[in-house]
Image (cartoon, rainbow, N blue to C red):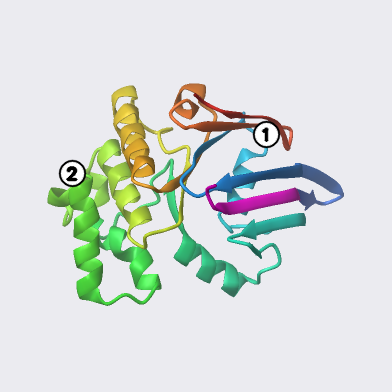
Amino acid sequence: MSEVIIECKDIKKEFKIGENITHALRGVSFKIKKGEYVAIVGTSGSGKSTLLNTLGLLDNPSSGQYILNGIDVSKYDDEMLTKTRLKKFGFIFQSFNLMNNTSCLNNVELPMIYNGVNKKQRQETSLKYMKMLGIENQAHKKPMTLSGGQRQRVAIARALVNSPEVIFADEPTGALDSETTKSILKILKELNEAGNTIIIVTHDNEVAKSAKRIIRISDGLIESDEVLK
């Protein structure tokens, strides 16, 4: 049986604005095993982004347990959250989140800088992943000079350099045309087939079908959890 990497137990998240309380997550429970490719699907306001932030240790739940590799990380302080996030996770975002004032190579290196990796190793590792993604010839260009698909490949390379246990993709094709979307989904599929655990968050049912399992969320609750054939 595959190893369980992520387990959520009755996760709730509330946001208080003035006297108003928004219940973004109302008691979410599920497990994700090593090597799975899971799509979390929901409309705007469904709670999917809040769930992603919780799973990616970008925010703490209000209550419940988030167990990562057998350890309850729900109550970690900011320093522990940052250290764990850098070590365990890679992130791909809809808006790429690249620094336009520096080279693509420097963007890819960034997670390794935070992890204290020396310059020679950073460059070798970055170029290895950029070559794998077919963008090694863009290494010394600035992201703003690249197409959307190329920028997303830079972001994917950046997500991979620390050899994360889980890759989170937040609407990774939302800013791309249909042909580029297909190429990015093909890359994610190949990464999963190579053994990477991938969690993609999307509102697009067609994008979700690229995964092997779909968790649908609505009004802060899991509506369905389906393994695709």
Task: In the rendered structure, find residue 46 and report the number of the disc placed on it.
Answer: 1
Which of 212 and 121 lies nearest the eye of the viewer? 212
Which residue is at the front of the view, 68 or 25?
68
Residue at the (32%, 43%) spot, across then down: 152
Residue 7 appears at what percent x and percent y?
65, 51
| Residue type marked 1 | Ser
Q: Is residue 61 above or below residue 149?
A: below
| Residue 62 visible in the snapshot | no
Between 114 and 15, which is closer to the camera in this rendering? 114
| Mark 2 Cα-neighbour bin, 10 Å: few <14, some 14–19, many ≥20 | few
Q: Residue furthest front?
A: 1
Q: Point out the tag, 1 or 2, that comes first from the N-terminus.
A: 1
Disc 1 is placed on an element classified as: loop
Specify the quadrant of the image occupied by residue 173.
top left
Q: Is residue 4 magenta?
A: yes
The residue positioned 29% from the left and 44% from the top of the image is: 153
Residue at 29% in and 31% down: 183
Q: Nearer the viewer, residue 85 or 107?
A: 85
Task: Say which element carries label 2.
Answer: loop
Q: Is residue 63 magenta?
A: no
Please state the extent of the stretch shown in magenta in the rendering.
Answer: 1-12
Residue pushed farthest left? 137
- Residue bearing the label numbered 2: 134
Q: Main secondary structure of the magenta part?
A: strand
* Amino acid type at image mark 2: Gly
The answer to whether any part of residue 85 appears in the image is yes
The structure residue drawn at horizontal position 23% and vertical position 74%, both measured from the top left corner, is: 119
Residue 74: which quarter of the image?
A: bottom right
